Amino acid sequence: MAAEEGTIKKNTVFVGGVTEDTDESALFELFSTFGDVIDVQLPTAATNPAQAQEAKHRGFAFVTFTQAVDAQDAIDNMDMNEFRGKVLKLSLAKPQKIPLQGAGNRAVWETEEWLQSFGKKLTNERKGVTNREDEEEEKEKEDEQNEGEAMEE
């Protein structure tokens, strides 16, 4: 039974409190007692690419089981238990938030689409250069003001 795209997978467990010396194989061995483990991920912290061998994980892991029952078993049995000197905190993993329009954590003015749409206009305004549409709008406003003043007299 494959999960459809867009549905929440209930067979991935978030494991918090992982020690620095713990690797994927140790977690695989620890959690395989609860069922078939498909995948173990230890996300690494952003480091200098020149020192990739020294990349440290961020202190948490994701363990994916074949069945949701096995994942719940692992949570029930291992949550708040000690492993290698630290207390593990387990819960069902929440799906990653999908960024709107691919922008992620970037400011809207850093996207190519925004720059193409508004970047040139802002640059021209700073330089005092306007395009025809801006000039026409200003002329229309002036004409309306002049007509209003003429009617008052």
Image (cartoon, rainbow, N blue to C red):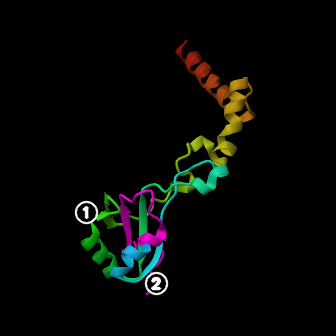
Q: In this rendering, would 58 be left or right of 35? A: right
Position in image of residue 145 (x %, y %): 59, 21
Can you tell which quarter of the image residue 28 is in?
A: bottom left
Circle 2 crowding by C-alpha within 10 Å: few under 14, some 14–19, many from 20: few
Position in image of residue 112 (x %, y %): 67, 48
Asked whether 15 or 145 is in front, the reply is 15
Reply yes or no: does residue 17 show up in magenta.
Answer: yes
Name above or below for residue 109 compared with residue 59: above
Q: If you read the primary sequence from the N terminus, does the residue marked by circle 2 or circle 1 appear first?
A: 2
Q: Quadrant of the N terminus?
A: bottom left
Amino acid on which the number 2 mark rests in the picture: Ala
Residue under the image location 35 percent in, 62 percent down = 84
Residue under the image location 31 percent in, 62 percent down = 88
Name above or below for residue 53 compared with residue 40: above
Task: Name the front one of labels 2 and 1.
Answer: 1
First to last magenta residue range: 1-27
**Would you name the residue on which mark 1 appears?**
80
Residue 122 visible in the picture:
yes
Position in image of residue 94 (x %, y %): 38, 64
**Would you name the residue on which mark 2 appears?**
2
Asked whether 119 or 28 is in front, the reply is 28
Q: Are marks 2 and 1 in contact (CB under 8 Å)?
A: no
Residue under the image location 68 percent in, 38 percent down = 119
CA gap, disc 2 and disc 1 = 31 Å
Position in image of residue 3 (x %, y %): 44, 80
